[in-house]
Image (cartoon, helix red, strand yellow):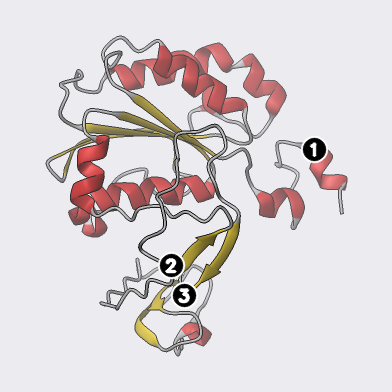
Amino acid sequence: GATLIDGMSFRAAYALVGVKGGTALAESLKPTLQGYAVAVAQMEVVISIEADKPVCEARVAEPPVMGYVSNGNLNLDAGCRYRLWERENTAQCLQSSWIIITGSSNTLLEFGNLINHLAPDEYHVDRPGEMIGASAVADVIIEDGKVTYWDTVSNQLEVCRQVDKAIAVQNDAACREAIREHLAKAPAYGGSGTRITMFISFFWDRTALALDIVGADAQWAAAPVGLVTQVGAWYNVCSVTKEDYCPRKELLIMD
């Protein structure tokens, strides 16, 4: 149902709220370099799975994920379902915990979505270093539905650049120290807020660094830690456009 998409240009912004195969509920287009596009709409959620299905056991090594999507709902082959969490329930579940997210562009979107879910006012706040490619690390604390702490490590910090793997290995110790000092600036663990830390990680390399640093952090040692990770990066520049700065050169020669 999109009607404005043909007006997209380089560095323009576009947002759409709708249902696949249906009409556009809300749509917004901002011209080149004119800022974010925001579309807001209210829609009826159609639940296509039976409410009496048992809830899936997620705290296992391999939780159920295979299935098919119908009307926006995941129908699992395992015959179970996952709960949908409203903000209050999510905040209660994650209260006093430290969530670590590592990966590239997709996980950065997850990072932003989780923050907006827990602190809805953030939809309208332009935070430094939140754009894709701007930060190597973003560290956030949320309390009572508000962001109370936000700090970042610039992606331009030379010792933490990941483009050349050989140089990244040489700078590993210096990068670890820079990130350790950055995380130490956060307020001490108080048992009430939720801390969310995003580490940009091309493939797995920076994930190991993140786990080491978080595991050694004394100020938040009492916090339960959750990890969300994506082992991948730059599928476009490594596999499609095949740019020289792809950190895994072997991917450049693959079809």
Near-viewer residue (8 or 146): 146
Near-viewer residue (33 or 51): 51
Near-viewer residue (68 or 216): 68
Task: Estimate the spatial distance between the alpha carbons at disc 3 and disc 1, rounded to whole Å.
Answer: 40 Å
The structure residue drawn at horizontal position 30% and vertical position 9%, both measured from the top left corner, is: 218
Q: Is residue 92 above or below residue 87?
A: above
Residue located beneath label 3 in the image: 71
Near-viewer residue (29 or 235): 235
Q: Amino acid at mark 1?
A: Lys
Q: Is residue 82 above or below residue 58?
A: below
Q: Is residue 234 left or right of residue 24?
A: right
Residue located beneath label 2 in the image: 49
Q: Earlier in the sequence, mark 2 or mark 3?
A: 2
Residue located beneath label 1 in the image: 249
Q: Is residue 231 above or below residue 177?
A: below
Judging from the image, what secondary structure is the residue with disc 1 in? helix
The structure residue drawn at horizontal position 47% and vertical position 54%, both measured from the top left corner, is: 80
The structure residue drawn at horizontal position 15% and vertical position 29%, both measured from the top left corner, is: 192
For label 2, count other residues whose C-alpha is less than 10 Å away and answer few (under 14), some (14-19) or many (20+).
some
Q: Is residue 148 left or right of residue 159?
A: left
| Residue 81 visible from this viewpoint | yes
Q: Quadrant of residue 92?
A: top left
In percent of width and height, residue 115 lies at 29, 47
Q: Quadrant of residue 43?
A: bottom left
Judging from the image, what secondary structure is the residue with disc 2 in? loop
In percent of width and height, residue 97 lies at 28, 28
Task: Estimate the spatial distance between the alpha carbons at disc 1 and disc 2, rounded to whole Å.
Answer: 44 Å
Q: Amino acid at mark 2?
A: Ile
Q: Is residue 67 left or right of residue 178?
A: right
